[in-house]
Image (spheres, coloured by chain):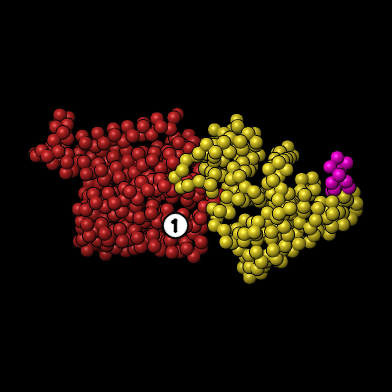
Chain colours: A yellow, B red
Amino acid sequence: MVDVLTVDKVTAGYDKDPIIRDISFAVPKGSILGIIGPNGAGKTTLFRTISKLMRPWKGSVFYKAADISTMSQKEYAGHVAVIPQFRSVPPPFTVREFISMGRYPHSGRLARMNPEDISIVEHTLRLLKLENFKDKKVNALSGGEMQRVFLAQGLTQRPELILMDEPTIHLDITHKMRILDIIGSLAKESGLTALIILHDLNLTSAYCDHVVMMKKGEIFAKGTPLEILTGESISALYEANVRVGKDPVTQRPHVFFLPQKFTGIE
Amino acid sequence: MNRGLLLLLLFLFCLGSVVLGLFSGGMPIPFEEVIAALLHPAGEGTTHTLIWDLRLPRIFMAGVVGASLATCGVVFQAILRNPLAEPYTLGVSGGGALGATIAILFGIGGLAMTLICFAGCCLSIGVVLGAAHMKNFTNSMLILSGIIMSFIFSSAVMFVFTVASSREVHASILWLMGSLSAPPDGSTGMLLGIVPVMAGLIFFAKDLNLLSLGDETSYHLGLNAKKAKVLLLLSASLITGVCVALSGVIAFVGLVIPHFTRRLFSADHFFLLPSSMLAGAGFLILSDSLSQILIRPMELPVGVITGMVGGIFFVLYLIKARPEEVI
């Protein structure tokens, strides 16, 4: 299957010292790749490099066959949607206006919304169950609603690849699952490819087809959840006491956390 | 309310202000004489001169300056994502004030003074954008370098005050308060020059919508944020520079009007820009008319009216607005 995203021997950083070193992996079309790792592992630096906010010092990032450094920002945004972790509260646009801005890469400077744009926006509103919010001001929404609106704006770009940094942070379990279920069904039905940074290992196991583990700026392990989400690897990655079982429904690994008061291990 | 209807109401407000402006001035003129003068552009006499040579050009100037300051305020608030941003945030007023006080000190008036003042504005814009360039045009760098330039220019103005005569200091202070009473020769041409630039900002409504979400978000949506920011800030600052050079530092129009129109129309710049143009033009024409009527036959600097009226309405708005409505 064709790889939509290829990260090839990428080294990148901010000042003199590289934060990430010699990172390589590929994400096949229609699959979800999860990136996990402890704080300071370099996940966000990798995310910023793939999303074109930083240039790699060495190596390259490819969208399909194109080196992303040769693509204009508008061209890149026409294929790739980026949902960063931190976004400030937007100005008082209505939800509909805010989501419509996702059509920017596909439209001219003065062009108003054409019927195709309108139909895409309406479809996205329905998909994310935002029809009842469409005339509400986006800055008056709750955290969960706002996160869905951010995702809706990204999906309105009609991307082939979506990059998400901690999209479920601060959300309750219902909203976490709703967001990841939508990505999962789009991957299955429309061939959307996703790269998601996650901290929740069980969500990673349940939703991702491939996992990249990062530690101290390098790849610690990569493979399917079944291959690499083992008690040994997770304990070594996070230096934490865990036990890994198998979920009887999904047949995927399930991580159990073992608090010190039960194990006596420091 | 329907956005088209709101725009129509703002247009009518603007028109009403123009009518009031025609009947304002140091000397009251009967209604029928104003109408007669308007209907006979080639006529003669005192009333005709007052209407065609003084009041209409003044209304035109107030309209264009008011529309410009409000529009530039919209641009600055969108790009800098700061509720206190206004057309003078990059220190344009400070540069203009220094240019004007130096011109007054050396007894230079008219068009030459306007050009010196505009040069001061350009100096400030150049230094601030140059400094911000070193930090990738981040908003905090733009705002901080604008404030620093304002302090430096303000100190330079104080220095000029200490060596100037009291008459020159008085003239400078009056200029600093902003006035539309004495447009210099060539002002109509300069104003006509900025109208297309101001109207052209509507071409960037989408870019402004994106920039108001923040640099990184607009970049992720496909906008070359740095290029758009520099182009828009430069255009808005130059428009502001022309306004400052012609009418001094008129307070509050560029700060207050965008907040009101954003509340009326949401944050979509396709409506925010034209509505702010109309509201700014109407507000400044109205303020200028009041400045001529209130202590007749004397005249108040228009900045006194805009500061007071704008300030009071702004406080009321802030008290009434929900926290999330104040960006």
Q: Which residue is drawn at 54% across and 44% down?
A: A103
Relative horizontal placement of residue B26, taking residue A151 as reference (left or right):
left
Q: Quick check: is B8 in the magenta stretch?
A: no
The residue singled out by tag 1 in the image is B230
Whether residue A139 is visible: no
Q: Which residue is drawn at 51% across and 55% down?
A: B224
Of the residues shown, which amino acid type is indicated by label 1? Val
Residue B131 vertical position relative to residue B260 in the rendered view, above or below = below
**Please, which residue is most extreme toward the left here?**
B45
User: Which of these two is toward me, B295 or B293?
Assistant: B293
User: Which of these two is toward me, B103 or A125?
Assistant: A125
Q: Where is residue A31 in the image (x, y as percent from the top left)?
A: 73, 49
Magenta part of the chain: A245-259
Q: Quick check: is A246 in the magenta stretch?
A: yes
Q: Residue at x 17, y 35 (%)?
A: B38
Q: Where is residue B114 in the image (x, y as percent from the top left)?
A: 25, 57
Q: Which residue is drawn at 40% across and 30% down?
A: B5
